[in-house]
Image (cartoon, helix red, strand yellow):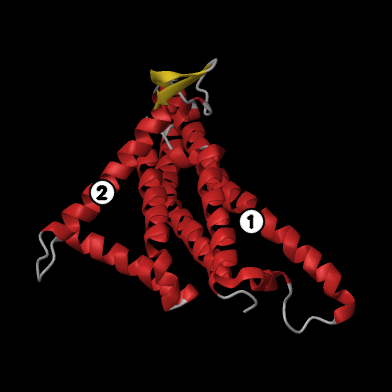
Amino acid sequence: MIDPIEQFNIEKIFTIGHIGNQEIAFTNSSAYMFGTVALVSLLMIGGVASKRLVPGRIQSIAEITYEFVASTVRGNAGREGMKFFPLVFSIFMFICISNVVGIIPYAFTVSSHIIVTAALALMVFVTVLFYGFYKNGLKFLKIFVPSGVPIYILPLVVFIEVFSFFLRPISHSVRLFANMLAGHIALKVFASFIPVLAGIGIVGYFGAVLPLGMVIALTALELLVAFLQAYVFAILTVIYLNDALHPGH
């Protein structure tokens, strides 16, 4: 029996130390996160190292990625939002590269764990709160009071706005986690049919063509989803940061 959930198991590689009775371990998840950061660093440092007038492949990828994220920030938060470009760019690249690496057979998908996506979402949430009050003071609370709302329904609208604001980290993290989890489970399930059908005989080999085709199609779809989920997470980050920059707009 092939367990489609087994691919998400966190396994200890070595023990770092202990805090009280709690073991602090370096896991496969930690290794893939460090690997993702290393790949992003190599891509960006290697891309700008040559500084050719006619860019090569690596430099082109680095420049296109930079401009793509920069235009997303400017388009949704204005030029003032560019102060948060390093944060948004780092989040986008980390999620995108880790998602793509996770599609490789037998690799580990970092963003398929809610603790990782929740940590990223909470980091964005705390940044919005801190900078919103730092820049605007109590005027930051204008985000809970939309302009033009009739006074008799204002309390209800304010309650809905406050409630939805504090739900942001949940929706922000669960969206990425659920999409990556579901996609990899589907891939594993269809892939498990291939050896089972192939073991039946000649007829099984022909029958295995269908799940093989589904695996190929789902892999292509997962590559698209890997990029789209990184983009959605990044653009939502920019939209939330825009509330801190321009409350009440």
Residues 60 and 191: in front is 60
Look at the picture and state if 155 lies above or below 89: below
Residue drawn 56% across the image and 44% down it: 118
Residue 167 placement (x, y as % from top left):
68, 54
Residue 203 placement (x, y as % from top left):
43, 27
Residue drawn 75% across the image and 58% down it: 163
What's the distance in space between the residues labelled 2 and 1, CA to CA?
A: 29 Å
Q: Type of residue at label 1?
A: Arg
Q: Earlier in the sequence, mark 2 or mark 1?
A: 2
Answer whether labels 2 and 1 touch (C-beta < 8 Å).
Answer: no
In the rendered structure, the answer to whether residue 36 lies left or right of residue 144 reads left
Query: Does the rendering let one see residue 114?
Result: yes
User: Secondary structure under badge 1?
Assistant: helix
Residue drawn 38% across the image and 38% down it: 33
In the rendered structure, the answer to whether residue 63 lies left or right of residue 97 reads left
**Quarter the C terminus occupies:** bottom right
Quadrant of residue 160 in the image? bottom right
Look at the picture and state if 243 lies above or below 171: below
Numbered circle sitting on residue 168? 1
User: Secondary structure under badge 2?
Assistant: helix
Numbered circle sitting on residue 41? 2
